[in-house]
Amino acid sequence: MTTGENGRHKRLRLAARWLALAAGAALVLPWWTVRVPLASFSPFVALCSALATHAVGLIVLLGVPAFVLALMMPRWFCRFACPVGFMQELLGGLRPHAKTRWLRWPFFGRWFLLLTLGGALVGYPIFLWLDPLAIFSGFFSAWRQPLTIASVCAGLALPVALLFDFLLPKAWCMRVCPLGAMQELMVVSRRLIRPRMRCETGGGGAEPHPHHSMILARRSFLAACIGVTGAVAARKVRGGPPLLRPPGALDEERFTGVCVRCGDCTRVCPTRILKPDLGEHGLAGLLAPVAKFDDGYCKEDCNRCGQVCPSGAIERLPLAEKRRRVIGPAKVDLETCLLANGQDCTACIRACPYEALKVLSDGFDTRPELILARCTGCGACETACPVRPHRAIRVVPKPGVLPA
Amino acid sequence: MKHTMTRRDLLKLFSAAGLGPVLASRVVADESEHKTKKIPEIQPIPVENLPRYPAFIRDGKVIQPERPLAVFQETDVLVVGGGAAGWAAAVSAARAGAKTMIVERYGCFGGLWTGGIVLVVISTHATENGQMTQVVRGVGGELLDRHAKFDHAIVNRGETKFNPTTDPEATMFLMDEMIRESGAKTLFHCWATDVIMDGGAVRGVVFESKAGRQAILAKVVVDTTGDGDIFAAAGAEHEQRLHAIGLVHRLGNVDRADHAKLKAAGYKSLGAIEPQPSVRWVNLRGPSSNGLDINVLTRLQFEHRRAIWERVQKMSKTPGGEPLFLLQTAPQIGVRTTRLLAGTHQLTYKESREPRKFPDVVAVGGAQNGKHAGWPIPYGVLLPKKLDGLLTAGRSFCMDDKLVEDGRLIGSCLTTGHAAGAAAAVAVKDGCRLRDVSIPKLQKLLREQGAYLG
Ligand SMILES: Cc1cc2nc3c(=O)[nH]c(=O)nc-3n(C[C@H](O)[C@H](O)[C@H](O)COP(=O)(O)OP(=O)(O)OC[C@H]3O[C@@H](n4cnc5c(N)ncnc54)[C@H](O)[C@@H]3O)c2cc1C
Ligand code: SF4
Ligand code: SF4
Ligand code: SF4
């Protein structure tokens, strides 16, 4: 690709890359909440989440243009759009004489891609979180959280990717990134179908010959099979108790797989109740969003997290529908509840936006009573309860849907 | 003795001329009489020949005849109702230099706090700018502080503590003291029944007592009856609510009872702690009812007292509960909410839960556990939409249903009462209508009196 590039071409490409970086950053900078998820422009995310969620939503469609372009123009995304690649390139300029020791490495990215696609078929796209746009978003989303170990961890992927590339220039793009690998495979597959078009060569690293393509096809099949098996196994291993996930999240098993860890939901949540999981609940859910109702609750007039989720891990629901999604029912601890112990407390009852709580009073026995058919698990009651250290009313994770 | 007789004779003469009550008040206040050993405990005095105007029946209707009313006193600020809110209003107005009078139907200050044995002052604190801050300051804060001087008068008070519980006797004593020091004049055992109107403004109240029906004239009236008796009588726009009506009681000998055994028998809680050892107060929520309906109040008084008696009897026959006894049922039935003023601003629960500022803030409501943010209370919640000459404070100020649960707490009653008293004093001093009171002046006075306005 370097041959045809004259100075003008080069400048144009540079301009495009700056533009893409700026546009990408504009979508994820922490000072405002744009509701278009950056990562959904990635065809890798789009394809895997369509497979994993069995749905082609608006978000998946956002990935289509990039997909089509990638068919026509090898590695166009890496060359013109990828903000991570560009940042790596800029950094790489600081140490121009690095060795390319990695040239003999296997194509990890391809394995990541195929394993993830295979996993996606059974609902668990294992390495989806390696998507560069997700990594880029994840970094900026972390800013909006208060400075904690969790937020630092959630934002760590981008610096790690940058450092990696700094030490081993181009290794990320050519050997690790599943999106890069995907673009290459697309060119290869096109060649399998129309071998005559081989004049257009793939990007820098891989230039497979036709018989290579056959080998590749066999390997792909193998990898996909491993992916499926791996995903099934991962889900089996996962299987732990459900957690407090954003409203409309996929079932726990698929959620941890489909979530790309881009942190977009944590960034747009107006009450900042969504926090990256620091592995408190096992490795499978590492950095996926969990809801914490200490200082806020899931607002009745909000469905933002579903709107921005690029992978469909959180369903994109209209507000009316979201208001019927249950995070889990609230449960009162009568031992510590003030109302149940003779004080005039009704904090939870008044806080509930769904009127799912009422005072039950029978002589000297008074307590808050839950109307299960109304409770969405929004956590407003938990936020309002004055009892410390453990609130006397808490949402128990048990997702579901309210009756219409 | 002879001297007294003469004065009483004189009084009779004056009372015919309508001046009697003025002097009578001085006689009542003259303590030296009690102390003079020479006066026998029982002795005859002349029958007071007050003019009588009995009602009569005409055409099957009971008619109250037109009659002149003796003016018991004229004052600047008249506070009706001596609960937490009214007491704070009277102290604040008197301290600000206004001639102040407070009328209370029972024999003590504190209302539900003391007479209702609702002893825990909830929402004294809030978290402001990341720090737990006391929001009940000013006269209310001073009252709580002064409890600390006595043993067994207050618990949960101090640097890191909030929501203290007080001993009702200590509270009543201190309230008496502070009213006396402030120079406000008190009338106990007087029940305000009507208003005196002058055009669109309230100019005083009519009250009933053992001394008959009399009037008090005032430049400004503060309605802290809790039930809005006065603004309702004046025809001010208002709303009415049903709410749970209960009756608090106190258990004695609690420390000697076996709590574990009682718990196993189904008695989850023995009530809330008090400053005194071995005594606890027990809340009773009761059914949602109309606190202005005398049949309801009477029925509930019967039913609650019976339920309490039976419960304590049962407890004391339960293994572990033998030492328990019923110390007292509250002298005042627990009416939570009845009338709410339609003020120039209705403060809503939603407003109270959002970060929000009011230019006319006169108090800050606390958080139940001190952990949440405080909620500023604007002057408009005390001020009727149209009626002049009157403010309300305490559990009847203008708020929505959900906020009632915070607004009626003792803390908010103390602070809104303080604000109303100060506003009344400013209006009197400036000779202006209550709705034209200079907010900066009012806020300055409140701050000078130690109030917290955020
Ligand atoms: C059962 C119960 C439990 C509660 N628990 C708590 C709690 O735990 N913590 C808390 O902070 N709050 C609690 N509250 C609320 C709180 O106690 C009251 O809302 C608050 O004390 C009201 O103060 P107030 O001054 O506005 O009215 P009140 O205390 O009702 O005072 C009104 C005063 O006006 C007098 N009065 C009324 N009408 C007239 C009239 N016509 N003429 C002359 N005088 C009149 C009354 O005798 C009374 O003294 C509880 C309330 C109840 C009923
Ligand atoms: S829907 Fe709830 S969890 Fe999702 S962004 Fe809005 S408030 Fe946060
Ligand atoms: S009961 Fe609690 S969790 Fe359930 S809807 Fe109401 S506030 Fe939300
Ligand atoms: S807010 Fe907490 S203490 Fe108050 S009634 Fe509800 S559960 Fe009980």
Image (cartoon, rainbow, N blue to C red):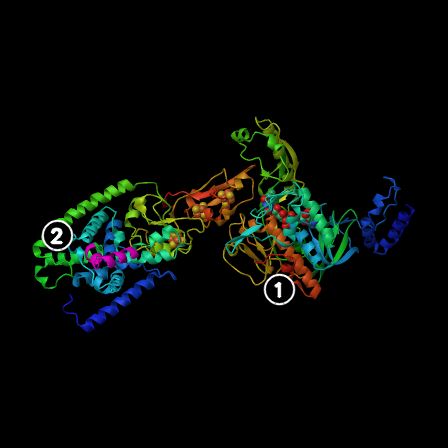
Chain where mark 2 sits:
A
Disc 1 target residue: B439
Front-lying residue, B5 or B253: B253
Chief secondary structure of the magenta portion = helix
* Residue A360 percent coordinates (x, y): 51, 40
Please tell me which residue is depicted at 24% across the width and 44% down the height of the picture: A231
Q: Amino acid at mark 1?
A: Ile
Q: Are marks 2 and 1 on the same chain?
A: no
Q: Secondary structure at mark 2?
A: helix
Residue B244: give x, y in percent of width and height. 58, 44
**Residue A251 visible in image:** no
Depth check, front residue: B393 or A271: A271
Task: Find residue B427 and report its horizontal and vertical position in percent.
Answer: 68, 63
Which numbered disc covers residue A216? 2
Q: Is label 1 in a helix, a strand or a loop?
A: helix
Residue segment shown in magenta: A158-175
- Does mark 1's beta carbon lie closer than 8 Å to ligand 1? no
Among all residues in the image, which is located at the extreme right? B2
Density class for disc 2 (Cα within 10 Å; few <14, some 14-19, many ≥20) is some
**Residue B61 versus residue B119: which sits nearer the camera?**
B119
Provide residue B305's location: percent of width, then percent of height: 64, 36
Dot 2 amino acid type: Leu
